[in-house]
Amino acid sequence: VKVLGQIKLPESLSAIAEILLIPVISAVLVGIASIYLIGIPVAWLMSGLTAFLESLQGGSLLLLCVIIAVMMVVDMGGPFLRVAYFFSVASVAANPGVPQPIMAACMVATMTAPLGISLATFVQKKKFTKEEIRIGQTAWVLGAAMILEECIPFLARDPKRIIPSCALGAAVAGAIAALLGVGSSVVHGGPFILPIPGAVLNPFGYVVATLAGSVVTCTMLLLLKKPIEQTPENDSVTKAEIA
């Protein structure tokens, strides 16, 4: 859009450039790039991941649950999460009303990342900026609803510590859920599905897996992160706010 806006146009076209030409042309260019430059390799990746998960169905349920769990948090909404989630949903759709272990692993793992990060910002504030602490205060609410958006700022700023911490916590949660025979016949909802009759097989194990994975995520993250120097810059606080 910025490049298109710098192109000199005749007066007859300049009047409609900003409201018609630039939006249409930029949308077409981005659409073409999304389909042919990004969409094709991503589709290939997602097909490969789906085939890989399907190949595991006849093997160890524990291993499948752990892999599903890790895939749910490594990219916070990218292709890995989408493949794992839709694969889990497909298992529920194929067996309506029957709690599925991989769906339960998917759900508990998704909650561990935001809950664990939120807990970490509460336990050791000196290892996070003021802005991260503020986000952490609300991340647990969204985390309980299986929403990962609040984790993205942490991931973008420190992927080398966030990804392994969240992956380990999710793996622990998925493994515990599988070992305790947890299953879910609902595809979303976090702890809010627990009161629904028949929605969760072994609700106690569901809660234990979620809490254990969250604690592991928090512990791993605090072990990896070092205290940071609190400054107006990394706190995202202006001088006026400080005063």
Image: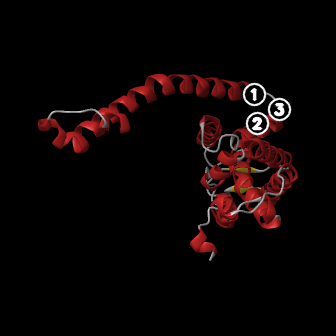
Image coords of residue 157 (percent x, y): 68, 48
Mark 1, residue position: 56
Mark 2, residue position: 67
The residue closer to the viewer here, 27 or 100, is 27
Query: Is residue 63 placed above or below 125 in the rendered structure?
Result: above
The amino acid on which the numbered mark 2 sits, given as a three-letter code, is Ile
Question: Badges 1 and 2: C-beta atoms under 8 Å apart?
Answer: yes
Question: Badges 3 and 1: C-beta atoms under 8 Å apart?
Answer: yes
Mark yes or no: residue 197 visible: no
Image coords of residue 102 (percent x, y): 72, 42
Nearer the camera: disc 3 or disc 2:
2
Question: If you read the primary sequence from the N terminus, does the residue marked by circle 3 or circle 2 appear first?
Answer: 3
Q: Is mark 2 on a helix, strand or loop?
A: helix
- Mark 3 surroundings within 10 Å by alpha-carbon count, few (fewer than 14), some (14 through 19), many (20 or more): few
The amino acid on which the numbered mark 1 sits, given as a three-letter code, is Leu
Query: Is residue 205 placed above or below 94 in the rendered structure?
Result: below
The amino acid on which the numbered mark 3 sits, given as a three-letter code, is Ser
Q: In this view, does 170 lie to the left or right of 31?
A: right
Q: What element carries label 1?
A: helix
Mark 3, residue position: 60
Between the residue at mark 3 and the residue at mark 2, the CA separation in whole angstroms equals 11 Å
